[in-house]
Amino acid sequence: MMRVLAVLLFFVMTTMPALAQEAQDLIGRWKIISLDEERPEFSGEISIYQGDSGKLEGELVAQDAYAGNFGRALQGCSVTVSGEYVFVYSFIKEMLVWEVPNPPFGYVPDHFRMTWESEDALVGLVNGRLSVRWERIDPGLV
């Protein structure tokens, strides 16, 4: 019986992703995909790196379309890992595209609360409402 439990434990530990990855595991480029059927237009890419202060930082280009309006924003980010959660707080550096035929429409910074799905994917929410998935770009290079 102990042998079966040991084999089962080994299998679970080697095949299941860790619930909480190390902060350094976030470093790299990630593709952002909307999982929300009502808002499939939201997408982007975030690059996470270790800043001069030693803390994780990022640069994000995200785009969204809503009610006939379209925006693409370059954003700076601070990245925090707390337990199983990854928090990304952004600020808009520059609006790269801004098409607003149907005001009122304002592009707000994109803030994320994510959890690890695997070593190459995270899932969570942007701005507390839109379901998104991050997929590591070039996972073999990490």
Image (cartoon, helix red, strand yellow):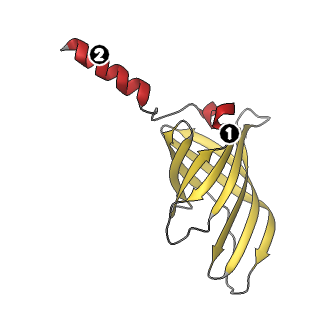
Q: Please state which of the two labelled residues, at mark 2 or mark 1, is closer to the viewer.
A: 1
Q: What percent of the width, then of the height, locates residue 126?
A: 56, 59
Q: CA distance from mark 2 to mark 1?
A: 34 Å
Which of these two is toward me, 136 or 130? 136
- Do the residues under discs 2 and 1 have CB atoms within 8 angstroms? no
- Label drawn at residue 35: none
- Whether residue 11 is visible, yes or no, is yes
Residue at (36% x, 27% y) in the render: 12
Q: What percent of the width, then of the height, locates residue 122?
A: 53, 45
- Whether residue 142 is visible, yes or no, is no
- Label drawn at residue 138: 1
**Amino acid type of the residue that numbered disc 2 sits on in the rendered structure:** Ala
Which of these two is toward me, 121 or 88? 121
Farthest residue, direction top:
3
**Amino acid type of the residue that numbered disc 1 sits on in the rendered structure:** Asp
Residue at (48% x, 39% y) in the render: 84
Residue placed under numbered mark 2 in the picture: 6
Image vertical order of residue 37 relative to residue 59, above or below: below
Q: What percent of the width, then of the height, locates residue 128?
A: 52, 61
How packed mark 1 is, by other alpha carbons closer than 10 Å (few <14, some 14-19, many 20 or more), is few
Which of these two is toward me, 46 or 55? 46
Mark 2 secondary-structure assignment: helix
Q: Is residue 139 left or right of residue 118?
A: right
Mark 1 secondary-structure assignment: loop
Which of these two is toward me, 139 or 110? 139
Farthest residue, direction left:
1
Q: Is residue 53 left or right of residue 10?
A: right
How packed mark 2 is, by other alpha carbons closer than 10 Å (few <14, some 14-19, many 20 or more), is few
